[in-house]
Image (cartoon, rainbow, N blue to C red):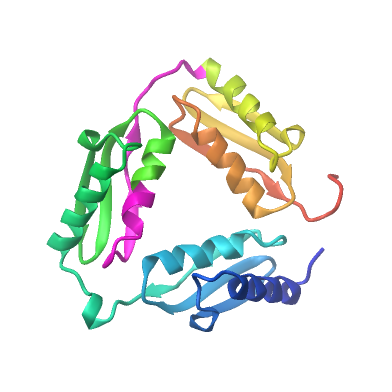
Amino acid sequence: MKTDGQIKQDILDELVFRPNIDETQIGVSVEEGVVTLSGTVNEYAKKVAAEKAAKSVQGVTAVAEDIEVKYGDDYKKSDKEIAKAAVDALKWNSTVPKEKVMVKVEDGYVYLSGEVSWSYQKNAAKRTVENLLGVKQVYNNISLEQKIKPYEVKERIKNAFERMADIDANGIQITTDDHKVILTGKVHSIKEKEDAEKAAYRAPGVYEVKNNIKVQFYTEYA
């Protein structure tokens, strides 16, 4: 099992490795596998990238993200400008049913609402607006329509896990409660844990995923 010091060094190395991140702007601390990221960046996309970099490191069990986004005067945008840019970006994204997504902006914070059929549409809406200039944070409150009976969800998720090379389907147990999915079991990294959750959310009819998967860092499962 990695020490906190080893995990911290691996995260710092990963930040250096990623070209879209200035590692000198990011502070990293680790305590019992829980990572805290701090610092100030000039783009929301850099904040997201730093979080993804930390979560990709083996040994990380959770990430507390305290990075602040501050735009320079030359890059500041009014809420009206951000809202218009968000609406235009959503119109150009064929993945998102634009007539079903509403945008609200307050002090650079973007709130998405509405109802779509699939989780990937909900996630695509967030990705579409989070890189826009002036955006400080995106809150994705889009809900999902019911498209499948709950008892069919488990089999679809199981099949999805088996198709994904990065997820050991044998190490994950799936239970369903109406439109809620509960994941248990063990994986090797926080990225695998999150990938399993994303796969579960891709199943139509899933409104909530409770991810109780534990991250274990041994070569073999216990």
Please tell me whether residue 25 is drawn above or below residue 154 in the rendered image. below
Residue appearing at x 75%, y 74% in the figure:
6
Which quarter of the rendering shows the N terminus?
bottom right
Residue appearing at x 58%, y 47% in the figure:
194
Asked if one can make out residue 211 in the rendered structure from this viewpoint, the answer is: no
> Residue 54 appears in which quarter of the rendering?
bottom right
Residue appearing at x 50%, y 30% in the figure:
180
Q: Position of residue 8 (x, y in %)?
A: 67, 74
Which quarter of the rendering shows the C terminus?
top right
> Residue 13 appears in which quarter of the rendering?
bottom right
Q: How many marks?
A: 0
Magenta region: 126-150
Query: In the figure, is residue 5 to the left or right of 222?
Result: left
Please tell me whether residue 7 is drawn above or below residue 81 in the rendered image. below
Q: Position of residue 201 (x, y in %)?
A: 50, 35
Residue appearing at x 58%, y 64% in the figure:
53
Query: In the figure, is residue 130 to the left or right of 9?
Result: left
Asked if one can make out residue 174 in the rendered structure from this viewpoint, the answer is: yes
Query: In the figure, is residue 10 to the left or right of 20?
Result: right
Q: Residue furthest left?
A: 80
Q: Position of residue 32 (x, y in %)?
A: 69, 68
Q: Position of residue 10 (x, y in %)?
A: 70, 71
Q: Is residue 139 magenta?
A: yes
Query: In the figure, is residue 122 to the left or right of 114?
Result: right
Q: Is residue 88 magenta?
A: no
Please tell me whether residue 168 is drawn above or below residue 158 in the rendered image. below
